[in-house]
Image (cartoon, rainbow, N blue to C red):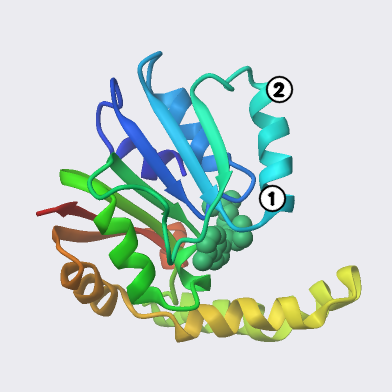
Amino acid sequence: RKEAVALFGSLAGKNVLDVACGTGDLAIAIVKAGDDTTTVTGADFSKEMLKIGTEKIKKNNLGNRVTLEEGDALNLKYDDSSFDCVSCAFGVRNFADLDIGLKEMSRVLKKGGTMVVLEFTAPKNRLVGLLYRFYFTRLLPIIGGVVSGKKSAYTYLPDSVYKFPSPPEFKKRMESVGLSDVSFIPLTLGICGIHTGVKT
Ligand SMILES: C[S@@+](CC[C@H](N)C(=O)[O-])C[C@H]1O[C@@H](n2cnc3c(N)ncnc32)[C@H](O)[C@@H]1O
């Protein structure tokens, strides 16, 4: 998340939208990286996540600069070109329609504004890929199932990662919604990475 935030550059005076904000970790990291003039709106459709996030924000005394609110990424309630930056961490993979979600995120971004998407990826390195696949598809569902009693949640995660577009495919999807200078930075041995683009 730290690396994703750094990609926004100076956050002074910036108004940022964090889509699928969950409990607000990225929204908090963004506002902390900025100054008194940085504001963040986090949107998520899970009331439970927002409740936990709002408590966290209160504890951090950031209530005047971070607002978390209910919203569907596929139908954002904000006007066109209303944010200087748009982010989404580990959210786009779960969108019911990836292209509609990306289109919405691009629509609310100002021309010249930056979009940053943090997401899991299937590692390219063969050895890391094999170990990752073994852990993710064999070990994790067993351990997660025993600990939580919900094995399906731990089979959904690897399934969704392997079905998600590869970085070159995702680049095309970002370009198709009006973003340019699209690039991908792999992180953590390539098991996740940051996609960035600039609204044209
Ligand atoms: C894995 S969590 C990530 C949360 C947060 N961004 C983070 O990095 O911790 C995925 C979040 O995406 C949200 N989400 C998925 N689809 C969404 C949609 N269409 N609109 C709004 N939120 C969505 C879920 O409610 C969940 O909070």
CA distance for labels 1 and 2? 16 Å
- Kind of residue at disc 2: Lys
Q: Which residue is mark 2?
A: 59
Q: Position of residue 56 (x, y in %)?
A: 69, 31
SS type, badge 2:
helix
Res 49 label:
1
Q: Is the CB–ligand 1 distance for label 2 below 8 Å? A: no
Residue under the point 65% across and 81% down: 156
Count of all numbered marks drawn on residues in the image: 2
Q: Quadrant of residue 57?
A: top right
Is 6 rendered above or below residue 129? Answer: above
- Quadrant location of the C terminus in the rendered image: bottom left
Q: Taking 101 as reference, is 180 left or right?
A: left
Q: Quadrant of residue 133?
A: bottom right
Q: Position of residue 139 (x, y in %)?
A: 74, 80
Q: Position of residue 84 (x, y in %)?
A: 25, 38
Residue under the point 43% across and 67% down: 74
Between 136 and 107, the one lying in front of the other is: 107
Q: Is the CB–ligand 1 distance for label 1 below 8 Å? A: yes
Tell me the quadrant of ligand 1. Answer: bottom right
Between 41 and 35, the one lying in front of the other is: 41
Q: Taking 173 as reference, is 39 left or right?
A: right
Residue under the point 42% across and 63% down: 75
Q: Taking 76 as reference, is 182 left or right?
A: left
Give whichever of discs 1 and 2 has the lower sequence position: 1
Between 93 and 184, the one lying in front of the other is: 93
Residue 49 shows in this picture: yes
Residue 195 shows in this picture: no
